[in-house]
Each structure stands twice: as C-alpha cells, then as structure tokens.
Amino acid sequence: MEQRELHTITCSLSRREIEQRMCNPNILGSFIKSYQPPNISDSFLPFLLFLCTLSPPLSLSPCFYRLEANTVAQRFSSPGYPKGYLPKSRCQWQIRASEDNAIFVTFPFFHIEDDCSDDFVSIYDSLSPDDSQAITEKCGQRPPSNPLAVTSSGNIMLINFITDSVVQRPGFEAEYKAIPKSKVKTCGGVLSENKGVFTSPLYPSFYPPSVDCKWTIKVTVGKKVRVKFTMFRMKEPGVDIRVCHKDYVDVMGTKYCGEMSSLDLTSETNVLDVSFHSDESFTDKGFSAIYSAFDPANPCPNKFACASGICIGEELQCDGWNDCGDMSDEMKCRCEEDQYSCDNGLCKPKLWVCDRVNDCGDWSDEKSCSCGENEWRCGDGLCMPQDVVCDQKMDCEDGSDEASCKTCKEFFKCMNAQCVNKVNAQCDRVNDCSDDSDEANCACGTRPYKLNRIVGGQNAELGEWPWQVSLHFLTYGHTCGASIISAKWLLSAAHCFVTNTVFIVLNHVASNWLSYSGMQDQYKQDGVERRAIKKIITNPDYNQMTFDYDVALLELSEPLKFTNTIQPICLPASSHVFPAGMSCWVTGWGALREGGSKAQLLQKAMVKIINDTVCNIVTEGQVTSRMLCSGFLAGGVDACQGDSGGPMVCFEESGKWFQAGIVSWGEGCARRNKPGVYSRVSKLVDWIKKETGI
C-alpha cells in the first residue's frame, strides 16, 4: 500500500470525529486492521492519530522518533534548529525508559511562535496524545532562568511538535534522561526544625503527574507555624481556583491552586500539615515555601502582625495603604490630625481629600466635593474650571472637555492629520486612524521571555526589563540608568551629564561613557551588548536648579541587536494619559537604601502615580508640568541614588509597556510624604522625536 493511500485511509474520518487534536484510536485501529498495511507497528499508531488532523493531507514522510532514555543525558531538537523550523510541521518523539525509571526532559533552549493556536509543543504522560494525560502545552520563548523542565510519572513520554505559522522561529533543543521512579514519588515527611524550606516535587522543574505528598511541620511546644510561599504556581486549563479540584496544596482544610502573588498561612497549634496533590493531567512549576516558628504572644517582634500572619513595619499601620493585603493594618485605626477618617473606618492623608481619586474605596473622601459654580463636570464625574472646555488641552482624563470641540490638539493626531478623539489610541491594537498610523511603529514595549511571578521578589529576572540600560562613567562603574527607545538611541536624564561638580566638563564628553544593554548582574557580561556613546544631547531648557526639562538623549556608536533581553520601550504620545493611582514599575541598580551602596543585581519596585495636586503640595510647589510624582506617601518604596535616568514604565491593557517617566529627583529615598519625582515623558516626547527622528 502506498504511503499517500494509507494517509488517505487514516484521515478519512470526519472532522467531527477528531477531538482535541487526535482521532479516535478505536476507529482508526479498525481502519488499519481492515487494510492490514505492512510494516506498521503499534508504536506508530499515535503518530498516525495526530496526522489525521492535517488539512490538506500530506505525504506520509513522518518526523517520527523512538528514543530510549538511560541515566546518561541525551539530546534532540526540532527540525531545522537553530536556523528555524518550517510551517505545517508535525513531529513526534516517543521516549521509553526501563520499568523502574521515569523520564526527565528539560529544554535548555525554547523559542517558538508566541501564539499557541499556531505553533506549540505538547507533552504527554503516555504514548497517546490524550489530553487526560497531558503534562503541559507550551509556546513562546523561555529565558535560561526559567527553562521548561517536565517529568513523567512512569517510564513513557510523548512529545508532539505542531506548527502552522509561516513565521520562522529557531525551535527548541531538549535533553532527556531516565531518573529513578523513587525520586519522582518520594516527597513529604516530618519537618522538626524551627525553620526550613520545602518545595513541590522536583522544584523548580514541573512537578510530575499523579503525586501525593504530605509534610508535617512540628515546632517547639507553645509556638505556632508560619508558612510563607515564595513561589506558587499551579495553573491548569478549566480549573476554578475557588474549588481547586485537580492540582492543589491543602492547608488546614483549605485548598489553594492557580498563581498566587501572596500567600502566607499561620497554624493554630505547634503542628501544621501541608498536603500536595497532582492528578493525571497538566502539571506546573509548583511551589517553594519557607516555614518558621513564632511566639503567638509576640508574633512579630518590633513589627505589626497582620491577620494573615505577615509582619510589616509598625510605621505602615494606619497609613492609608493596604500593606498587609487583607486590610488588617488599616482597621480600628485612630486617625491622626493630618489624616481623614473615611466612612468605612479607614484613615487616609487629608491631602487626598477632594483630589478626584477614590482613595477611601467608598468615595467618602470625594463625596462633598461636588462641582461648584463656573465648574465643568467631566464625563467621569470630576470637576474642572469652566474655562478648561475647548481650550485645546485635554484636562479631563476621559477627554470630555474637548470631545465636542472642533479642535483636538491634545488628542492623538494621525499622520494624515486626522484627529482620534480617544484616550491612549496609540499601539492599542485597534486601528483608529484611517491610515493606521496609530498602530505604526509599535514594535516596542514587549518582553519576549515567559517569566515566573516570584512572590515578594525584588531582584529583577533576566529579560524582565529588556529596555533597561546601565551607563558607566570612566572607571566609576554604574553611574546612571537609561532606556532603549530605538536601536541607536537611549533616553536618560540631563542631570547625569550636566552637573555642578568638578566633573562638569567630563560628564558631557560622550567618550567618557559606556552603555550596557541586556544586563542583569553588574558583574556578568553574558548576553550583554556594550556600546560607546557617540553623542549626548541634553534638553536646552534643562534647569539645574529646578530639574525642569530633565531629559537627555544618547546616540550609540553602533546599533543594538535586539534579542530576548534587549528590546525598546514604547514612547507615549503627547496625549497619553497615565492616571493617578496607576501601578507602574521603576528599575535600576541604585542604592537599596538612602546612603547605601549600589546594587549588584537589577532591582525593581512597584510604585503608584500620585495625583498632580497632591504631588505639588508634598513637594511644596516645586513640580512643573514636565514632572510627575510616583511612589507611596507612606514611604518605603522609591528610586534612589544611581537610579537617575532610568525608566518608570507602565503596562497598558493593549499588552504594551510605555515609559511614563525618567528618574529625576527626590528628597532622600523612600521618605514619608516625599515621593520620587520623574520627568514626564509625554510632555517631552515631541522634542525626543524631533532630535532622534524616531
């Protein structure tokens, strides 16, 4: 029987009979048996099953492999690796090991199309592509710090590689070996020390299917157990995280699953049982947890004890911010003289009253701030002076003060001069301009790598902020930060290059500076691109006294090569709105505390944009329209020395990151009521584009 005839037979089933990328094996088996084709082994059946999904039918020249795993690691790769795989590829690897072993597979390199509906790798805990025994299905790119690594529960594994996309990607390289089943199945036990660490099986690799573990933590009598999960990820298709009926961690009768950004639990006695369960299908990274014993009479020495068991600084209690995560630090508070008592019992700074932001959560801080005479009410309910209407400036965040006007100076202007009466139309994946110019030049603001969410972590992961640049001055090492805005241009702060110090001349000499892109660790150069600075352009209106117009452009001696860890950030349009209360991120290698030394690893901190009115008050009127405040009025999180010139970036619903600010100045670091002040990029973007031609 010819190969094409066999393929036609096996794929003669209707599409309705093909479910979840596989044909019905019983029906297909009867077809094969009735025709009795020669040289077709039972192990070839799974490959024929998923060939049935091909449309149109292809010639049966399969990309099919049978591998034997042993204790010595062996490798295989996708066809065409590393130059790139072809579209319409269908490949399968069947891996077997001896009966007393399981199979461990890791992917040192993994880069395929980011859309899993086009290209994907699916891995099964069987030799049949059955979703009830699927371990995982993945696409996209993964950094070296977060490789895909999976384990079977038994001595067989199936790996399918399916591509439809015409976009070529390098593909993957995989390493496989046999490991003892006892290593896969052994977990749990009694933990009797007063502190320690425990993890899901084989962490940080994916935990195996069909595993049950139980840890019994016993600490000194009279004390209790606190468990803090530093990493928690058990995501599975179609699972309601309120029920957690498949993979879960069970603590004190409550099941936890999904992806947690914060999980701290406290026992009722000195003994705590923690159970872990994974079913037959779909696994994930699992968890890593720290446990410790504490005295219930003094659970947080010199700190405030949250109801969840977290310990926070005493100064954070009743400061208006939900530092505990469960609001327990803001309950039963007696408001200070400089605080406002919300109707719901919370205390907020009086500076926030009538600032047009719902700080209390129940709008009580804004309830007696109705619009007066000669005021205009914006579409979102905010009040503005009447003369803001049709003044060619978008004063209302929703643009309603200019919506009925014939001019649209402050809205997005298309290349063909069309005005888009919409907030943040740029790069939002909607073609608002008739010439599509609002979606042009949007190859920016993306993070190629798939990254884990580390609970409470502040060290940046490799590739997490691919636009971040370290600027080194002479032999002084890291001095300022910058951001990549194109292959040849960096964005930084003018005060890094125009100073009143003895280096006033040296700082502005381009040859005295070097830029390092793709860097995470100041002491490691792997994957880092070093470039000399060709030209430094500081804004001509920069004021050394007030830090107004604190922006600089750096032209590189040669273009950067964009990689997984080196990417440009999106510049906002002049009309782009970053509303008060929006969570953004500031990054850099600056000092970890006021007066401290610079960081070796790239640091990240989440900050909130602060209302302009409040910003002006707390800075005693020192901010201009080219500046914005961000941080927390309670203090504790801020940029610091050495972060100057670095980016503050915000994530939009469109999936793009935009640079809202440039680290400029501040009073100290992370002081109460002294937020960081940033150069407002949207007010400087026209000058940036004029000088660079971007």
Image (cartoon, grey):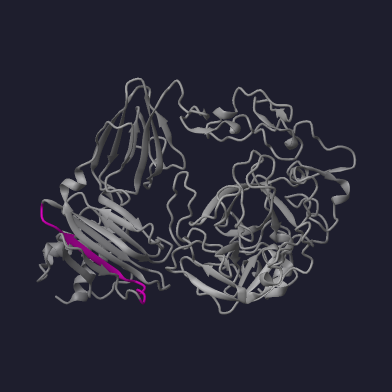
Q: From the viewer's side, name the closer residue of 88 and 24.
A: 88
Q: Is residue 414 above or below residue 649?
A: below
Residue 76 screen position, x and y as percent: 24, 68
- Quadrant assignment, res 95: bottom left
| Residue 656 located left or right of residue 373 | left
* Residue in the image at 47% along x and 47% along y: 457
Q: Quadrant of the C terminus?
A: bottom right
In magenta segment, residue 98: yes
In magenta segment, residue 686: no
Residue 548 screen position, x and y as percent: 77, 59
**Residue 577 visible somewhere in the drawing:** no
Residue 426 screen position, x and y as percent: 65, 62
Q: From the viewer's side, name the closer residue of 679 and 509.
A: 509
* Residue in the image at 87% along x and 46% along y: 386
Q: From the viewer's side, name the closer residue of 58 and 640.
A: 640
**Residue 327 visible somewhere in the drawing:** yes
Residue 171 screen position, x and y as percent: 35, 69
* Residue in the image at 22% along x and 64% along y: 93
| Residue 103 located left or right of residue 636 | left
Q: From the viewer's side, name the closer residue of 621 and 383.
A: 621
Q: How many marks?
A: 0
Q: Quadrant of the N terminus?
A: bottom left
Q: Is residue 290 above or below residue 294?
A: below
* Residue bounds of the magenta highlight: 83-99
Farthest front residue in view:
502
